[in-house]
Amino acid sequence: MIVIAHPDDAEGNCGGTTARWAREGKIIHYLVLTNGDKGSDDLSMTSEKLARIREQEQEAAAKILGVSGITFLRIPDGELEISPGLRRGITRLFRFHQPAIILTHDPWKPYQLHPDHRAAGFLTLDAIIAARDHLYYPDQLARGLNPCRVKEILLFGTDSPDFWVDISNTFELKLEAVHCHRSQGLTAAEVQERIRNRALEVGKAKGYLYAEAFKKIVL
Ligand SMILES: [Zn+2]
């Protein structure tokens, strides 16, 4: 399961890994926390229209990568808070989907400016612990859900990578998926350059052509 603050956070950070794992037969589910309704430089854009566009872009990008399903929580962009109610809701989704591996934002990245990225990381980690222990939210278990024991967490956007995925064979799919997020104002050439240079640089450290890097936590 991949938990992200905004539509478009997944593809640039872990799109190559997603496409690779989907090809290998893994079931991948996105949980998109906010509706991305502030992410535009276009002064004629409205939040309602932008939220609709970004959801469609997210669906198109996920399809290219082979993602099986998406849950949109549609919280207003910039207003994601580390709250008991959201932790409960995310815990319920983990118990429902029973993911073995969860990918999300590294909330400890120094100088991480976007509040939603910090909140998404912390909420996800808090919910992973709550989903595991049966005494959290016993009403969820009474309604038929089971505790969920996540085996690995991969944090992206990290300054402390210790796990690399070779995405040489799925890099073109990643590019195509990132390019679905056209509302974000980057031209195809800018997407190409930015994403390619980053993947080349990350790959170089491990002897891969293209790679994505994560901080891995084994539970
Ligand atoms: Zn974001």
Image (spheres, rainbow, N blue to C red):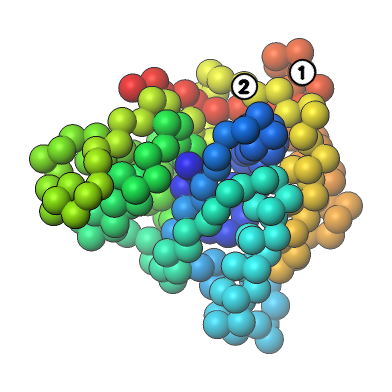
Q: Position of residue 10 (x, y in %)?
A: 59, 47
Question: Relative to 165, is 50 above or below?
Answer: below
In the visual, does 188 lie left or right of 28?
A: right
The reply to whether discs 2 and 1 touch (Cβ–Cβ < 8 Å) is yes
Residue of label 2? 164
**The residue positioned farthest toward the front in the image shown:** 144
Residue 147: percent from left, percent from top = 24, 38
For the residue pair 116 and 127, the one nearer the viewer reads as 127
Q: Residue 219 sits in which quadrant?
A: top left
Q: Please report the residue visible at 29 percent of the width from the left and 57 percent of the height from the top.
A: 89
What residue appears at the point 39 percent right and 20 percent down from the top-left corner? 218
Q: Which amino acid does label 2 sit on?
A: Trp
Q: Mark 1 points at which residue?
A: 208
Q: Which of 102 and 147 is in front in this view?
A: 147
79 vs 62, left or right, is left
Q: Is residue 110 visible?
A: no
What residue is rendered at 48% in x and 42% in y?
1
* Crowd band around label 1 with a 10 angstrom C-alpha radius: few (<14), some (14–19), many (20+): some
Q: What element carries label 2?
A: strand
Answer with left or right where residue 54 lies relative to residue 169.
left
Ranked by sequence position, the earlier of labels 2 and 1 is 2
Q: Count all numbered tags in the image, as a single digit.
A: 2
Query: How far across and how far down the image is residue 159, in percent?
Result: 53, 29
On screen, residue 149 above or below 120: above
Real-space CA distance between mark 2 and mark 1, rounded to the nearest whole angstrom: 9 Å
Q: Badge 2, how many Cα within 10 Å: few under 14, some, many 20+? A: some
Q: Nearer the viewer, residue 88 or 63?
A: 63
